[in-house]
Image: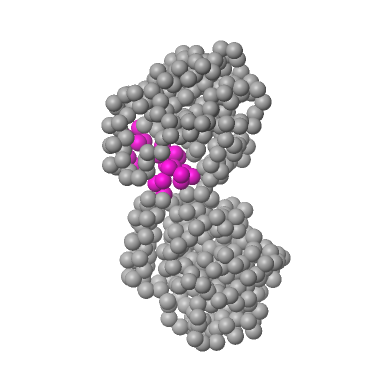
């Protein structure tokens, strides 16, 4: 296993590519010399029967025997064994021009995954029409169903940041690992950008890709990845819900945001506890966002935005720091042993406003809404509520902590949003 850290590792998954490597590796070396950064070339050998290994070593590449099967096995081996700040994966058959390494590396500070894309403006793929049709169709279907804003999900010409790929738990052994990487990267809040490039025909040998066979494998993986993308833990779950294709979900999210924004008013010092990827951070830009889930904060990062990774039971703020504290869709997820309202009261100034939103388990409307939502999005709203509140019980808890309920509103009679004021 390689231990020295380099800035850029160029990774070539190979199976019987000796003829191509003789021409490709010297060209890659020329490109890396111009980058003025510590670089190294790695060949992940999948059990070649020709002299791929000998050719690679003779031309200065580090050879790592592949563990597992298929392209996914090669990618996992590279991610696990190569210690570099950036890993760039490319084909060894000259379909990926080596000079394009510079283009991807130049954009490394714009995201954690940079994709050489055939399907964005100015991109192109020299492929048989049947392969191009199936490839573009599969990419469109995957992008739409998985809500991934990437045109070329199946391109293997990519630049990866170590921090991103080091936290992805990958399982697929086929080329479906490419979609798996992007789906899981989106769920962790990492940025993915595309750079247009021209895909070329391979120079020597025949392609290992069997398009129709892989198309079937892709479709089998689609349902699993769809469930992952619609998990409540997905970094962009709340943001996508605000613009959901499901009318009820979209209306509900926007109604909630409108009520909370109305309760906040023009106050400037606002804290949103358990903010997730809520649109509230955009509609009330004066708000400090706090969440214990670092993935959601990573997704919401923007220059000058204030985001804090912390837990509600230990807020990292001084006493009376805020005029308004918002806790929407939070308290029902906290274990009974967690007392959130004491810390909220401490950080809120006298006369300040506390806004609490939670399902109202005291009303029959919530039970109907939950069943309806479960039919449309199975598994997305699994019952993970540790605490069940009704208006009366929640008001009583707030009064015990020195709050007076001033106003409350329901969303379709099922979700309650309470506005309370700190009296002391």
Residue at horizontal 51 percent and vertical 60 percent from the top: 115
State how many labels appear.
0
- Apparent side of residue 8 relative to residue 238 in the rendered image (left or right): right
Image location (x, y in percent) of residue 131 = 36, 70
Looking at the image, which residue is at 53% across and 63% down? Answer: 158
Q: Is residue 364 above or below residue 407?
A: below
Residue 18 image position (x, y, % from top left): 54, 84
Of residues 360 and 151, the one nearer the viewer is: 360
Residue 49, placed above or below residue 93: below
Span of residues in magenta = 229-251
On the question of residue 240 being in view, the answer is yes
The answer, for residue 255, to whether it is visible in the render is no
Q: Which image quarter holds the N terminus?
A: bottom right
Q: Can you say which quadrant of the picture contains the C terminus? A: top right
- Say if the magenta span includes residue 236: yes
Q: Find the residue positioned furthest to the front.
A: 337
Based on the picture, tell me whether residue 230 belongs to the magenta stretch. Answer: yes
Vertical arrangement, residue 373 with respect to residue 389, above or below: below
Viewer-nearest residue: 260 or 379: 379
Residue at (41% x, 51% y) in the render: 228
């Amino acid at each position: 296993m390689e231990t020295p850290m380099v800035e850029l590792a160029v990774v070539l998954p190979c199976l019987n590519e000796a003829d191509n490597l003789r021409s490709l590796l010297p060209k890659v070396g020329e490109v890396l010399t111009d980058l003025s950064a510590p670089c190294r070339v790695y060949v992940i050998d999948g059990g070649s029967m020709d002299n791929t290994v000998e050719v690679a070593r003779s031309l200065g590449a580090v050879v790592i025997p592949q563990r597992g099967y298929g392209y996914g096995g090669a990618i996992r081996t590279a991610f696990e064994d190569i210690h570099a700040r950036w890993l760039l994966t490319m084909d060894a058959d000259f379909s990926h021009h080596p000079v394009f390494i510079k283009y991807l590396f130049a954009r490394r500070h714009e995201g954690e995954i940079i994709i050489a894309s055939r399907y964005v403006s100015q991109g192109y793929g020299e492929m048989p029409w049947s392969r191009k049709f199936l490839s573009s169709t599969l990419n469109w279907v995957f992008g739409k169903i998985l809500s991934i804003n990437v045109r070329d999900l199946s391109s293997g010409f990519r630049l990866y940041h170590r921090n991103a790929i080091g936290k992805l738990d990958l399982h697929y052994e086929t080329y479906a690992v490419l979609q798996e990487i992007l789906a899981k990267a989106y769920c962790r809040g990492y940025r993915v950008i595309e750079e247009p490039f021209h895909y070329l025909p391979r120079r020597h040998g025949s392609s290992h890709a069997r398009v129709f066979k892989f198309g079937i494998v892709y479709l089998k993986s689609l349902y699993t990845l769809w469930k992952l993308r619609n998990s409540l833990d997905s970094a962009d779950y709340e943001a996508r819900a605000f613009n959901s294709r499901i009318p009820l979900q979209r209306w509900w999210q926007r109604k909630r945001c409108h009520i909370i924004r109305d309760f906040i008013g023009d106050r400037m010092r606002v804290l949103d506890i358990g903010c997730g990827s809520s649109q509230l951070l955009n509609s009330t830009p004066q708000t400090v966002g706090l969440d214990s889930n670092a993935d959601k904060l990573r997704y919401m990062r923007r220059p000058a935005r204030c985001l804090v990774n912390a837990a509600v039971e230990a807020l990292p703020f001084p006493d009376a720091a805020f005029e308004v504290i918002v806790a929407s869709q939070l308290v029902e997820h906290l274990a009974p042993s967690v007392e959130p309202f004491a810390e909220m009261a401490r950080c809120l100034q006298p006369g300040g406003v506390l806004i609490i939103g939670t399902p109202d388990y005291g009303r029959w409307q919530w039970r109907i809404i939950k069943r309806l939502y479960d039919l449309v999005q199975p598994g997305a709203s699994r019952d993970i509520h540790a605490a069940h509140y009704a208006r009366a019980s929640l008001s009583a808890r707030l009064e015990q902590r020195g709050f007076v309920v001033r106003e409350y509103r329901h969303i379709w009679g099922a979700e309650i949003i309470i506005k309370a004021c700190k009296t002391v």
